Amino acid sequence: MGYREQTIEGRNAVIEAYRSGKAIDKIYIQDGCQDGPVMTIKREAKKHDTLVKYVTRERLDQMSETGRHQGVIAVAGAYEYAQLEDILAAARAKDEPLFLFLLDNIEDPHNLGAIIRTANLAGAHGVIIPKNRAAGLTATVARTSAGALNYTPVARVTNLSKTIEELKKEGVWFVCADMGGTQMYELDLQGPIGLVIGNEGEGVSRLVREKCDMIASIPMKGNIDSLNASVAAGVLAYEIVRQRLQ
């Protein structure tokens, strides 16, 4: 699975790309453009944490492949998402207990890339992310994953809670990270397991948390009360690895 950048030119084309759920890494907008479609693009860019660069028309003309950029050129990632069934089949082929990361609205592409890197190193079979309100597979994610995105499949689902319900039928147990849970060393994290990591600010959402079988807390001795999402994912993932090695 390789990465290539894809350009999208024109105001309507960029708006439609956002509406279709395409992961856009950055947008180039002509200086001074303030009409309705451009303002819509700016709102979408802010919502999806897309990098926006303001450049001259001459610069856009140089970048354009079609000559019809209308003052807007977006750069989108071209990584393909895996199918959930493909991830399950790969685990069965290896005759290993399933190990998945499920990310509940991780919005920072650097965190997403770091978690994919950890998932690969911890031997996870795949990562599952939601389609909405979450970072997609952009170039930033690819760079931060340090190449792991080429080896660890990422599936994108419409509803994380329903996906958990479906995976429970496959015998998977789910553990999520939360300060108010049981200390992770006291939990049995062997066998088929799904590790759920929550949003950077709000943690695991209530609906997803209610679907989890276990709530794990990470012991903390400092003066602040939370870890970065990617660090928490790493700590819990390697407790799962430790228990699997026993």
Image (spheres, grey):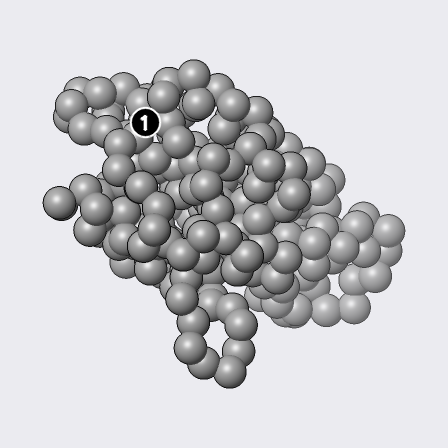
**Residue 32: quadrant of the picture:** bottom right
Q: Quadrant of the N terminus?
A: top left
In the picture of the structure, the residue carrying the numbered disc 1 is 87
Residue at 30%, 30% (x, y): give it: 192
The spot of residue 73 in percent (x, y) is: 61, 52
Q: Amino acid at mark 1?
A: Ile
**Residue 91, image x, y percentages:** 24, 26
At x 42%, y 77%, the residue is 221
Identify whether 87 is placed above or below 58: above
Residue lying at the far top in this picture: please name it: 169
| Residue 11 placement, left or right of 93 | right
**Residue at left offset 55%, top offset 33%:** 211
Q: Nearer the viewer, residue 208 or 188?
A: 188
Total labels drawn: 1
Q: Secondary structure at mark 1?
A: helix
Residue 58 sits above or below residue 124 on the image: below
The reply to whether residue 94 is visible in this rendering is yes
Residue extending farthest to the right is: 36
Q: Residue, x 32% and y 54% (percent of image)?
A: 185
Q: x and y percent of residue 131 in the render?
A: 58, 36
**Residue density around tag 1, few if under 14, some if 14–19, many if 20 or more, within 10 Å:** many
| Residue 78 visible from this viewpoint | no
Looking at the picture, tell me which residue is in the foreground, 60 or 47.
47
Out of 239 and 158, give the one closest to the viewer: 239
* Location of residue 168 in the rendering, given as x and y in whole percent from the top left corner: 44, 23
